[in-house]
Amino acid sequence: MMKGKAAFITGSATGIGRAIALRLAQEGADIAINYTRSEQEALETQREIEALGVRCLMLQGSVADDSRVREMIGEVVAKLGRLDVLVNNAGVTDFVTHSDLEGLKEEYWDRVMDVNVKGTFFCCRAAETELKKWGGCIVNITSVAGLTGLGSSIAYAASKAAAISVTKSLARVFAPEVRVNSVAPGIVDTRWVAGQEAHTKRLAEGTPLGRVATPEDVAETVYSVIAHSPFMTGETIRVDGGMFI
């Protein structure tokens, strides 16, 4: 389905981003993965992708750095020959109880908005020309926190709500050549929730499907949006096991 195409997935050394990169590679896409600090994990992900018989480019850099984002998009096009799919998965958070207003420091706000909102916008903007050339698509990984106001902190929820708004705005701007959608996971079994197993288990038991999501659950939805939803744009799809029905 994706043979001969190229995809750039930000924050893809581990977790959801890694699962998305592998899923698209399984369909024949060449992959560009991105990381900031997790070099060893990125190398392992690169090896797994290349074992599937496709090319894999590994790029270090923060999506909050606009100049580096433009460089990375340029490297993808120069080395893989094109760019058909952009998945904005890179994200950060600081766990702060919502009632602890004084604990939500200004630097937490700055970091989460820089990466989760500005970084998403920077990547979309840098990729626009190339994606329009190939009739490509963008999937932004947001969160149910952006729909409910819940989540790891008030700042995180606000950042994901903003990313959903950016998705809607860019769906209009990039149309009709490029579709822009968002996938909003609930709790996902990644290292983000390490040490909170009891809490996540309690939350999962209260959902219709009775478990938290795996990274592969999210990756499958992302692939479906890319490959099987040609008339959908500006939408946000929840992947939360029915937690917020």
Image (cartoon, rainbow, N blue to C red):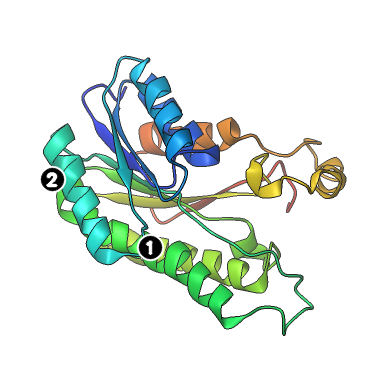
Residue at image position (80%, 39%) is: 208
In terms of depth relative to the viewer, which is nearer, 216 or 232? 216
Pick whichever, 244 or 90, lies toward us: 90
Q: Residues within 10 Å of mark 1 (few under 14, many from 20)?
A: many
Q: Is residue 61 above or below residue 222?
A: below
Q: Can the viewer see residue 17?
A: yes
Q: Is residue 205 left or right of residue 125?
A: right
Q: How many marks?
A: 2
The answer to whether residue 45 is above or below residue 164 is: above
Where is residue 61 drawn, in percent x and y? 34, 53
Mark 2, other Cα within 10 Å: few <14 / some 14–19 / many ≥20: few
The x and y percentages for residue 78 are 12, 40
Q: What's under tag 1, amino acid-wise?
A: Gly
Tag 2: amino acid: Lys
Q: Which residue is mark 2?
A: 133
Alpha-carbon distance for marks 1 and 2?
Answer: 22 Å
For label 1, the residue is 119
Front position in the image: 3 or 94: 94
Give SS at disc 1.
helix
Q: Is residue 42 above or below residue 193?
A: above
